[in-house]
Amino acid sequence: MRASVRNPGTATRHTGPSVQPWADDQAFRLQLEHDGFWNRMVAAGDRVPDMPLIEVDLGPIHLNRLRDTGPLVLVFFQHAGSPQCGAALRIYRDILAPGLSALDAHLVAVSPQVPDRLEAVKRRHELDFLVASDPRHTLIDAFNIGYSSPGAVESLGTGRSVLPFATVVVADRAGVVHFTDVHANWSTRTDPERILTAVRGIVRAPGREPGLAAA
């Protein structure tokens, strides 16, 4: 089963035509499949590329070095000024982060916003996990989870307009993706327990064939 995708309103993918609003998730998914987006998005069995990100406190970080010591959970969000993203990050701070720490897994929140602006969300919500910038949206593009939102240029501070769909990616220490969940925005977030279930599966059976956790 592929990741779920939620209606993004009138967002435009930067790699394809306009995405129109739909009444339900199934109609939106059918449109993505028709346009070829669905099969290009990150999925179980893919590999996480080793692309550098800029953590707001630590500076450049490399995903392969994080994976050396435990599974990796990537949470993609828009920017520090998004109330919906802020609400989701607080829930992940309170529920997801402690569970991942107990499993020796790394949680990284990723945004295309410049680091000096992105720092605000980490301070405001007292996030105790990594918050990193992907300012040229290279990782977002590698996962094919980005879309063009011209109104985001000022907020991002990069001169660019690409935002990520609300996406969670879970990978093992070899960089193999075991779980993905994609929504068009953060009005519906991925349940922390689904993420923890995916990580527990990796920790308990590291040699198993990768696959999505049950919905």
Image (tube, rainbow, N blue to C red):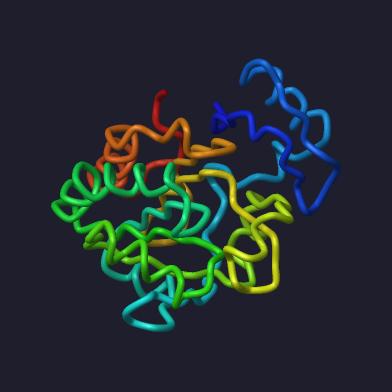
For residue 23, side relative to residue 196 (left or right): right
Q: Is residue 22 above or below residue 132?
A: above
> Is residue 119 or residue 17 the one in the foreground?
119
The picture quadrant where one finds residue 195 is top left
Residue 176 is situated, as x and y percent measured from the top left of the image, at 47, 54
Look at the image and tell me in which quarter the C terminus lies. top left
For residue 72, side relative to residue 178 (left or right): left
Q: Is residue 59 above or below residue 33?
A: below
For residue 13, side relative to residue 135 (left or right): right
Total marks shown come to 0
Q: Is residue 23 above or below residue 65?
A: above
Residue drawn at the location 44% of the way across and 59% of the way down: 80
> Is residue 101 or residue 114 the one in the foreground?
114
Residue 83 is situated, as x and y percent measured from the top left of the image, at 42, 46
> Is residue 5 or residue 159 the one in the foreground?
159
Q: Is residue 41 above or below residue 69?
A: above
Residue sitting farthest toward the right: 17
Residue 127 is situated, as x and y percent measured from the top left of the image, at 25, 60
Residue drawn at the location 27% of the way across and 42% of the way down: 91
Residue 30 is situated, as x and y percent measured from the top left of the image, at 74, 23
